[in-house]
Amino acid sequence: MSEIYHQSIGQLAAALSARRLSSVELTQAVIARTKAVEPLIHAFNSFDEAGALAEARASDSRRSAGQSRGLLEGIPVGLKDVIAVDGQPLTASSRILSNFVSPYDATVTQKLRRAGAVLWGRLNCDEFAMGSSTENSAFGPTSNPWDTKRVPGGSSGGSAAALAAGAAIATLGSDTGGSIRQPASFCGVVGIKPTYGLVSRYGLAAFASSLDQIGPMTRTVEDAATMLAAIAGHDERDSTSYSAVIPDYHARLIAPNRPHKLGIPREYFGAGLDPEVGAAVEKAIEYYRAQGCEVKPVSLPHTQYCLDTYYIIATAEASSNLARYDGVRYGMRAAEAADIDDLYARSRAEGFGAEVKRRIILGTYVLSSGYYDAFYLRAQKVRTLIREDFLKTYQEVDALITPTSPVPAFKLGEKSDPLAMYLCDIYTIGVNLAGLPAISVPCGFTASGLPIGMQLIGQPFKEADLLAAAHRYEQAHDWYKRHPSL
């Protein structure tokens, strides 16, 4: 039996239900583990030990009174530091929000509370979720628990690293262009990006509003189903929230699976794919084929335009969203400004990091007079073509299987060129542009011991099918049972 902090939600829920374990004991174990590994990985921006233990005691009291709220009752869950928690810091890993305390809960936070979860810590990320390595945080980079000289991925690197290291039982991240799936791949955990609109964005610090989506990171696919069921559903406070019936994800996991028709997009297996990553994903494809799945090559011809399209739309929306951080209403305010214009300029210059400034400048440019039609409007038209590529393939197959990232975790400081960093998201950004669900599942390790993830991309609001296909693979392999030695 693995250490308590490495066990799954399912295992721990059974132990809590049988009274072999209390939530206080579990939370104390996670706190102790966090303190032990945090100097090595720096996954947290902050945590409230007393508050977490108070929530754990309340959970134990509910359980004693026969009022358990479900599988998440008493389970410590970490949240990326872009998700609002009433009374706790919300920094987005940025100097401009370094002293900001959230006055309200995000919808997903409220849902976790209603499910009985113990909220544990604010997890480090790239500043305002802009990055692929968690090196852009104003509070310092996070390290990968499998090799602390390497990145955990990004932007939800703290969420993935804390989970892999045993400093949380499950976590929430946000995914704008791969920010849940890529770090899940790098850290050897499960990460699911739901269909756009399935999970409320109310209380999420906005980066690119038409792309952002909150999702869970867990040790197993079953745990991902548990977390997704807890946070999914319509929210009238989010105008993009979809009023969909949430199926029983757990029941669908164990239901008999019809053979899926899986498509292999040829554009995802070309130049730039690391040989070890490619070989691991090919073995996963062979597993599905051996299980009776029909596997066939497909094409997503507009994939070559995904990167350009993404970095026009995402930066344009970032430029608009981040205009609210002006040093006047909340957040950091520059001292000794000469006038209001100087206050704006100095507060933003001092408060934002280099990558955020880069994206604001690019976004402002593509939205400016004379360039809007040439760049932003054209990018939106190409986005439609990218989505249509996916929908056309779903007339032939049920889901797509690809690598999550073209490479395993790279060394800290290795990708100083922004374009080289942006290319790390080449297999994930199309999913966000098309608003589709996708999941990253561990599918092997490199010769040097670094995790490799495969990505399954599903049809809109077909998360249940996606989870079932991922669960089927996971349970036939032992990758999810392995943990880093720290």
Image: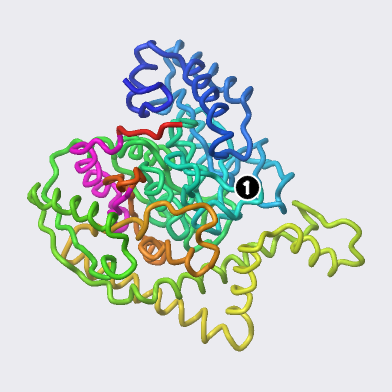
Q: Quick one: 280 or 292, which is closer to the camera?
A: 280
Report x, y in % for residue 151: 49, 49
Q: Is residue 248 left or right of residue 118?
A: left
Q: Is residue 185 left or right of residue 361?
A: left
Q: Quick one: 9 or 427, which is closer to the camera?
A: 427
- What residue is shown with label 1? 140
Q: Quadrant of residue 370?
A: bottom right
Q: Is residue 267 left or right of residue 323?
A: left
- The answer to whether residue 296 is above or below residue 252 is below
Residue 339 in sight? yes
Q: Which residues are magenta?
A: 452-480
Amino acid type, label 1: Gly
* Count of numbered tags: 1
- The answer to whether residue 283 is above or below residue 28 is below
Residue 458 in sight? no
Residue 189 part of the magenta segment: no
Q: Quadrant of the N terminus?
A: top left
Report x, y in % for residue 194: 38, 51
- Residue in the picture at 31% in, 48% down: 446
- Residue in the picture at 53% in, 61% down: 209
Residue 465 part of the magenta segment: yes
Q: Quick one: 209 or 178, which is closer to the camera?
A: 178
